[in-house]
Image: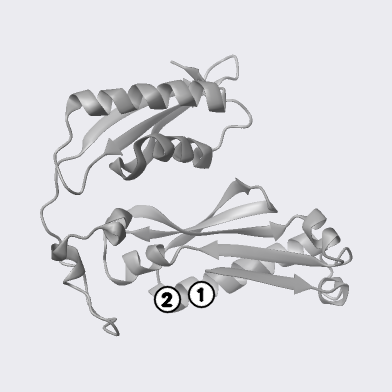
Amino acid sequence: MEGFRVFVPDEWEASGMDGTSFAAEDLKKCLGGLARHLFGDVEMRWVDTYFPFTNPSFELEIYFKEKWLEVLGCGVTEQEILKRNGKSNNVAWAFGLGLERLAMVLFDIPDIRLFWSDDERFTSQFSKGQLGIKFKPFSKYPPCYKDISFWINESFTENNLCEVVRGVAGDLAEEVQLIDNFTNKKGMTSHCYRIAYRSMERSLTDEEINDLQWKVRDLIQNKLEVVIR
């Protein structure tokens, strides 16, 4: 689901704020209200990030099952987009919301990949129009964890890393988690990520996961231009 809102100069000039600040504040107010309406009194936070069509850009995360879960991405629309649509004197905000993320919280579903599963242990638990159901966990195949450390550059973003991992491993990539970071005396920053591989249908072998991990390493170096440690 996506949303877009355009403001006219009178709206932000009356507030004493510049257009970008006004739009960003209104965006967070609207989406924060949406999150509270859907999830109740949950802990939430805004994370600065990068998207190609908004600046500044944010992700809204809520604390779910003892970890932070991203539920949407948003930001103040790049002025060039408005200019090309004859709205050069306006400002706007936009957001994109994954409905699966909402369902995960509302139905206590722990893994987003279950939505694409044909496993009857999952699909049989839900029926049209029944919104009060909570997911009942069933046994899963064990995960396989692989760590990777590298020196990042100024253009590095975690979203780009996740795209690389998912591009190689597809649905076998369950989670990409930052587990350590530090900056040395030369000002170079290192990140260490733990990648969890897991199949919903079978046990994975060390051989196939090692093969995926080497492909991830190669692509990270070539595409993201980081230095593997």
In whole angstroms, how far apart are the C-alphas of marks 2 and 1? 6 Å
* For residue 4, side relative to residue 203 (left or right): right
Residue 18 visible in the shown view: no
* 9 over 54 or under it: above or below: below
* For residue 29, side relative to residue 93 (left or right): left
Residue 58 pos. (x, y %): 59, 54
* For residue 188, side relative to residue 13 (left or right): left
Residue 148 pos. (x, y %): 37, 25
Dots 2, 1 in contact, CB < 8 A:
yes
* 25 over 139 or under it: above or below: below
Q: Residue at x 23, y 41 (%)?
A: 198
Q: Which of the 4 quarters of the picture holds residue 132?
A: bottom left
Mark seen at residue 51: none
Q: Residue at x 44, y 21 (%)?
A: 218
* 68 over 189 or under it: above or below: below
Mark seen at residue 34: 1
Q: Residue furthest bottom?
A: 129
* Nearer the observer, 91 or 219: 219
Residue 208 pos. (x, y %): 23, 27
Which secondary structure lies at badge 2? Answer: helix
Q: Residue at x 69, y 65 (%)?
A: 93
Q: Residue at x 30, y 58 (%)?
A: 116
Q: Which residue is mark 2?
A: 38
* Nearer the observer, 124 or 3: 124
Residue 170 visible in the shown view: yes
* For residue 55, side relative to residue 124 (left or right): right
Q: Residues within 10 Å of mark 2 (few under 14, many from 20)?
A: few
Amino acid of disc 2: Leu
Amino acid of disc 1: Leu
Q: Which of the 4 quarters of the picture holds residue 106?
A: bottom left
Q: Residues within 10 Å of mark 1 (few under 14, many from 20)?
A: few
Q: Which of the 4 quarters of the picture holds residue 16?
A: bottom right
